[in-house]
Image: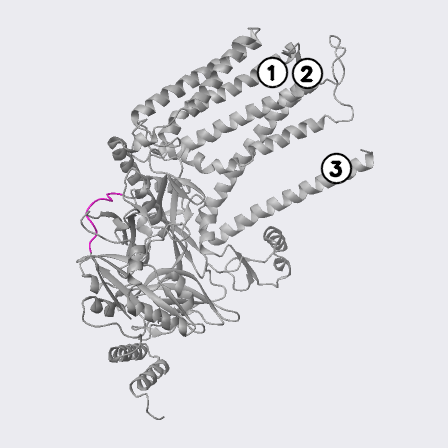
C-alpha cells in the first residue's frame, strides 16, 4: 500500500470512528434528555443506570482487549521476531510487509467480539450487590432463593467470560506459534519450543481453572433446574461428580504449571485426558427426570417453589365461589376479534382493544376499551358495553357521564392528536407535543442525529419534539428490568392514564417449573409493579404492588425514588384492572406440569394454547384445563383482581362431575336446528356466521358454559345473533343470554334476533334510559334525538 493510499485509509477509518462516536454520543444524550422530560425520578435512575452500564461495558471491553493484545504480542515476539536471534539463525521472521500494529488491531477486535454485551449483566450485578433475599430456602442446597436471582447468574456470566478468554486466547497463541515454527510435528510427535512452554502452560492453567470453576457451579445449575428435575438422591450423585470434575480441573491447572517447570508432559496430558473423560461422562449420564416427576417428595417441593415463583400462593385453597345462579351471571358477549367489526366504520379503524370497567351510578360495568382513529379525524377512546347489546344485536357504547348505553360507537372521551397512546407516532414534532422544547441549535442537532428526524432542524421556534410515546415503550425505557404488559386505559381525577403490569422474570429460579416465555424460558414470573403513564403529560410513575415482595423491594432500593411504595397508588387505581392475561397463561402452563398434573390447556387450530376467557362481567379470568383423551375439563384456574390483592384458585373437579371441553361443546351446539337455520340465513344474505369463544363460569348451581355468535354482513357492522348455553349435560340456545336460559328451561323457543314484543320493549326501555341520561347531564339536543327514535320505534307508521 502506497503512502497516499495509506493516508486515505487512515482518514476514512478516523472519519468512521468520529461518526460512530458522534452517533453514540447523540443517542446517549437524547436518552438523558428524554428521561429529564418524564420526571426527576426517571432522570436520576436512568442516568445512574446508563453510567453503570457504560462503565461495566467499557471495563470488560478494555480487559478483554488487553488480554488478547498482551498474549498475541508475547507470542509474536517469541515465535516471529523481527531479526533472527543468534541461537536460532533459521528462525522464521515477522513478515516485513505486515505492520506490527495489525497484531494489536487483531487483539482489540477479538476483545470487542468477546467482551461486547457485558452491559446485559447489569441487572444481575445490581441485585448481587444489593444482596436480595426472598426468605425461602432452596430444598437441595439450603441457600436463600435470592442467591439464584442475583449472584448466581452473575457468576455464570463471569465464568463463561473467563473460559472464552482463555480458550480463544490459547487457540490464537497456538496459531502464531505454529506459524513461527515454535510448535511443529517432528517424527510424528508434537514438538514445542522451550521458549514458549511457559506461555502455553499459563494459558492451559487458566483454562483448566475456568473449567474447574464451571464444575463448581454445576451443583447450582442442578439446583436451579437447568439440567431438569432431580430427586435428592440423584442431585447428590451429580454433585459428587461435579466435585470430582472440579478437583480434576484444579489438578489439570497444577499439572500445566508443573509442565512449565520441566515435569514430563505425559503427566499434564494424562490429567487433561482424565478431565475430558469426566466432562463427557457427566454430559452423557442420563437424567432421572421421569423418576423425579413421579416422586411425591419432589412434587411437594416443586409445588411450594412454584407458588413462590409464579405468585400462585395458596392456589388449592377454598374456591372463589359466586353467589348467583348461572342464569343470573353477567355475561361477556363480545370477543376481542369482533370489536373492530362491530365498532369500526369505512373511514376509521379500531385498535388497542382491552378489557376494563366504567363506573355508572356507583356500579362498575364491564366494557371493551378501544381507540378509534381515521384519516383527518381526532382519535377517540371508546367504551363498548360487553354485557349487553341492542335489540338487534348491535354494539352499545357508554359515554362519559351517561347513565345508560347508546347504540353505535359514540366516543367515551375525545382525545388529542398529541395524546400518548399505543398508536402514537414514533416522533411527534409540534407545539403541543409532550416532549423537549427545541430552544437551542445544539439540542436540535443532537435530537435530529439520534432520532434521524430532519424536522427537528427546520421546525419553527416554540416547537416541541416528543418520542417514545407508546405507553409500554415508555415504561420499558424507564424500567428496563421489568417486562410490561399491554396498556389499559383508566380515567380518574388526573384524566386519562395508561396502566400496565410490570413482570419480573428469571431463568435461574431453582426447582420450579420451567415454561416457555417470549422466545425463551422462565422459571419465575410474578407481577411486581403497577406502571402508569399520563396520556397528556407523559409522566411515568411506577408502584410496588405487594409490600411483602422482597424482590420488588430490592429494585425499589436499587432505583432510588423511581419505584414508589404500594400506599402511594392513587385510590382510583387500586382496583378495576383486569387480571393480566400474560401472567394467567404462565400460571396455567405451570399447572400443566408434572408437579401439579391439573390438565392441559386447550389448543386452537394452529396448536397454540387458547387465551383465558373472562366471565361474570369481566371480574373473573378463567382457564379450563382438560384431559385430552376424554375431552373433559379436569380443573379450572380462576383468577380475580381486587383492591385487597390478587386471588388465584385451582378448582379441581370431581371425577363424577362431567364438564365438557370447549371443542366438545361446540360440536354439540352445532346440532341445534336453529343454529343451522341461522347459519344458512346469514350465508344466504351475503354475510358470514362467526361463532365466538366458549366461556365457562363457576356459578351457584354448577359449572356453566356459554358461547356467543355473530353475523358479519358484507357491508355493515357485526351483530350478536345467537347465544348457546349449557349446564351439566343440558343445552339451550337463544338470540340473547337471557333467552338462551329460558330455552334451556324449556320456557320459550329461540326467536329471530330483533323480533317480537319483548325485543321492542327492550329497545324502548333503552331509548328511555338514554333520554333520561341526556336530560340529567343537560344535553337537550341528544335527549330530543333519543325521544325521536323512541317515537319512531313505538309509532312506525306515524306521519311526520
N-terminal-most mark, 1 or 3: 3
Q: Which secondary structure dominates the residues rendered in magenta?
A: loop
Comparing 510 with 102, the one in front is 510
Which x, y percent locates residue 220? 38, 27
Q: Are marks 1 and 2 in contact (CB under 8 Å)?
A: yes
N-terminal-most mark, 3 or 2: 3
Which x, y percent locates residue 685? 41, 74
Comparing 466 with 382, the one in front is 382
Instruction: State left or right for residue 746 relative to residue 56.
Output: left
Q: Which mark is residue 452?
A: none
- Reply above or below: 798 against 591: below
* Residue on which the image places disc 2: 78
N-terminal-most mark, 1 or 2: 2
Comparing 190 with 286, the one in front is 286
Q: Quadrant of residue 182?
A: top right
Q: Quadrant of residue 615?
A: bottom left
Q: SS class of the residue under badge 1? A: helix
Q: Residue at x 33, y 24 (%)?
A: 234
Q: Which mark is residue 10?
A: 3
Which x, y percent locates residue 702? 19, 56
- Reply above or below: 283 against 715: above
At label 2, counting other C-alpha atoms closer than 10 Å, the crowd grade (few under 14, some 14-19, many 20 or more) is: some
Q: Quadrant of residue 61?
A: top right
For marks 1 and 2, give the CA distance: 10 Å
At label 1, counting other C-alpha atoms closer than 10 Å, the crowd grade (few under 14, some 14-19, many 20 or more) is: some
For marks 1 and 3, give the CA distance: 34 Å
Q: Is residue 411 something one can see in this rendering? A: no
Comparing 788 with 296, the one in front is 296
* Residue on which the image places disc 1: 199
Q: Which segment is the magenta one?
A: 313-321
Q: SS class of the residue under badge 3? A: helix
Amino acid at each position: 500500500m502506497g503512502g497516499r493510499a495509506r493516508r486515505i485509509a487512515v482518514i476514512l477509518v478516523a472519519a468512521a470512528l468520529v461518526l460512530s462516536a458522534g452517533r453514540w454520543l447523540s443517542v446517549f444524550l437524547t436518552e438523558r434528555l428524554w428521561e429529564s422530560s418524564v420526571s426527576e425520578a426517571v432522570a436520576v435512575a436512568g442516568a445512574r443506570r446508563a453510567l453503570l452500564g457504560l462503565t461495566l461495558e467499557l471495563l470488560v471491553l478494555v480487559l478483554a482487549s488487553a488480554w488478547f493484545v498482551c498474549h498475541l504480542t508475547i507470542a509474536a515476539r517469541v515465535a516471529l521476531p523481527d531479526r533472527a536471534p543468534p541461537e536460532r539463525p533459521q528462525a522464521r521472521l515477522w513478515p516485513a510487509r505486515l505492520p506490527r500494529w495489525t497484531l494489536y488491531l487483531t487483539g482489540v477486535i477479538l476483545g470487542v467480539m468477546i467482551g461486547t454485551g457485558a452491559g446485559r449483566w447489569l441487572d444481575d450485578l445490581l441485585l448481587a450487590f444489593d444482596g436480595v433475599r426472598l426468605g425461602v430456602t432452596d430444598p437441595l442446597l439450603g441457600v436463600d432463593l435470592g442467591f439464584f436471582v442475583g449472584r448466581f447468574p452473575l457468576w455464570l456470566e463471569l465464568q463463561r467470560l473467563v473460559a472464552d478468554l482463555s480458550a480463544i486466547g490459547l487457540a490464537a497463541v497456538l496459531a502464531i506459534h505454529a506459524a513461527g515454527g515454535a510448535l511443529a510435528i517432528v517424527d510424528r510427535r508434537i514438538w514445542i519450543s522451550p521458549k514458549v512452554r511457559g506461555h502455553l502452560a499459563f494459558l492451559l492453567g487458566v483454562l483448566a481453572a475456568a473449567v474447574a470453576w464451571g464444575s463448581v457451579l454445576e451443583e447450582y445449575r442442578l439446583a436451579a433446574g437447568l439440567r431438569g428435575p432431580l430427586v435428592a438422591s440423584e442431585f447428590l450423585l451429580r454433585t459428587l461428580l461435579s466435585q470430582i470434575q472440579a478437583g480434576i480441573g484444579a489438578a489439570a491447572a497444577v499439572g500445566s504449571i508443573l509442565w512449565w517447570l520441566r515435569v514430563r508432559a505425559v503427566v499434564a496430558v494424562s490429567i487433561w485426558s482424565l478431565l475430558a473423560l469426566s466432562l463427557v461422562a457427566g454430559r452423557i449420564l442420563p437424567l432421572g427426570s421421569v423418576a423425579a416427576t413421579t416422586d411425591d417428595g419432589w412434587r411437594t417441593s416443586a409445588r411450594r417453589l412454584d407458588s413462590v415463583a409464579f405468585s400462585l400462593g395458596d392456589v388449592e385453597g377454598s374456591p372463589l365461589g359466586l353467589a348467583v345462579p348461572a342464569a343470573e351471571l353477567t355475561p361477556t358477549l363480545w370477543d376481542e376479534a369482533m370489536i373492530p367489526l362491530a365498532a369500526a366504520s369505512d373511514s376509521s379503524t379500531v385498535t388497542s382493544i382491552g378489557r376494563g370497567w366504567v363506573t355508572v351510578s356507583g356500579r362498575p360495568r364491564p366494557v371493551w376499551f378501544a381507540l378509534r382513529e381515521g384519516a383527518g379525524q381526532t382519535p377517540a377512546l371508546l367504551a363498548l358495553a360487553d354485557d349487553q347489546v341492542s335489540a338487534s344485536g348491535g354494539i352499545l357504547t357508554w359515554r362519559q357521564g351517561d347513565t345508560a348505553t347508546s347504540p353505535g360507537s359514540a366516543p367515551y372521551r375525545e382525545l388529542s392528536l398529541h395524546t400518548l397512546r399505543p398508536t402514537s407516532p414514533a416522533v411527534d414534532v409540534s407545539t403541543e407535543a409532550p416532549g423537549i422544547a427545541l430552544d437551542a441549535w445544539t439540542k436540535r442537532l443532537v435530537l435530529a442525529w439520534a432520532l434521524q428526524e430532519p424536522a427537528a432542524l427546520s421546525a419553527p421556534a416554540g416547537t416541541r419534539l416528543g418520542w417514545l410515546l407508546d405507553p409500554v415503550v415508555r415504561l420499558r425505557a424507564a424500567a428496563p428490568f421489568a417486562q410490561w404488559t399491554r396498556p389499559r386505559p383508566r380515567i380518574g381525577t388526573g384524566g386519562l392514564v395508561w396502566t400496565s403490569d410490570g413482570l419480573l422474570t428469571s431463568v435461574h429460579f431453582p426447582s420450579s417449573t420451567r415454561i416457555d416465555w417470549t422466545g425463551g424460558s422462565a422459571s419465575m414470573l410474578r407481577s411486581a409493579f403497577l406502571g402508569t403513564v399520563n396520556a397528556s403529560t407523559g409522566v411515568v410513575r411506577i408502584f410496588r404492588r405487594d409490600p411483602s415482595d422482597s424482590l420488588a423491594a430490592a429494585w425499589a432500593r436499587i432505583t432510588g425514588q423511581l419505584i414508589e411504595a404500594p400506599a402511594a397508588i392513587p385510590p382510583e387505581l387500586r382496583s378495576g384492572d383486569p387480571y393480566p392475561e400474560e401472567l394467567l397463561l404462565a400460571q396455567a402452563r405451570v399447572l400443566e406440569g408434572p408437579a401439579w398434573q391439573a390438565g392441559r390447556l386447550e389448543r386452537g387450530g394452529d396448536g397454540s394454547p387458547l387465551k383465558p376467557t373472562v366471565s361474570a362481567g369481566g371480574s373473573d379470568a378463567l382457564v379450563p384445563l382438560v384431559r385430552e383423551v376424554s375431552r373433559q375439563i379436569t380443573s379450572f384456574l380462576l383468577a380475580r383482581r381486587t383492591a385487597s390483592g390478587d386471588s388465584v384458585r385451582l378448582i379441581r373437579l370431581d371425577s363424577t362431575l362431567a364438564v365438557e371441553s370447549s371443542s366438545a361443546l361446540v360440536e354439540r351446539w352445532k346440532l341445534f336446528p336453529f343454529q343451522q337455520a341461522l347459519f344458512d340465513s346469514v350465508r344466504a344474505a351475503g354475510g358470514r356466521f362467526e361463532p365466538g369463544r366458549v366461556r365457562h363460569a363457576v356459578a351457584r348451581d354448577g359449572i356453566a358454559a356459554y358461547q356467543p355468535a355473530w353475523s358479519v354482513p358484507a357491508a355493515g357492522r357485526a351483530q350478536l345473533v345467537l347465544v348457546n348455553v349449557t349446564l351439566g349435560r343440558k343445552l339451550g340456545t337463544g338470540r340473547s343470554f337471557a333467552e338462551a336460559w329460558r330455552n334451556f328451561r324449556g320456557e320459550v323457543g329461540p326467536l329471530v334476533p330483533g323480533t317480537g314484543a319483548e325485543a321492542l320493549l327492550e329497545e324502548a326501555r333503552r331509548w328511555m334510559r338514554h333520554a333520561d341520561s341526556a336530560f340529567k347531564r343537560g344535553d337537550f339536543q341528544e335527549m330530543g334525538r333519543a325521544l325521536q327514535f323512541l317515537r319512531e320505534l313505538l309509532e312506525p307508521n306515524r306521519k311526520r
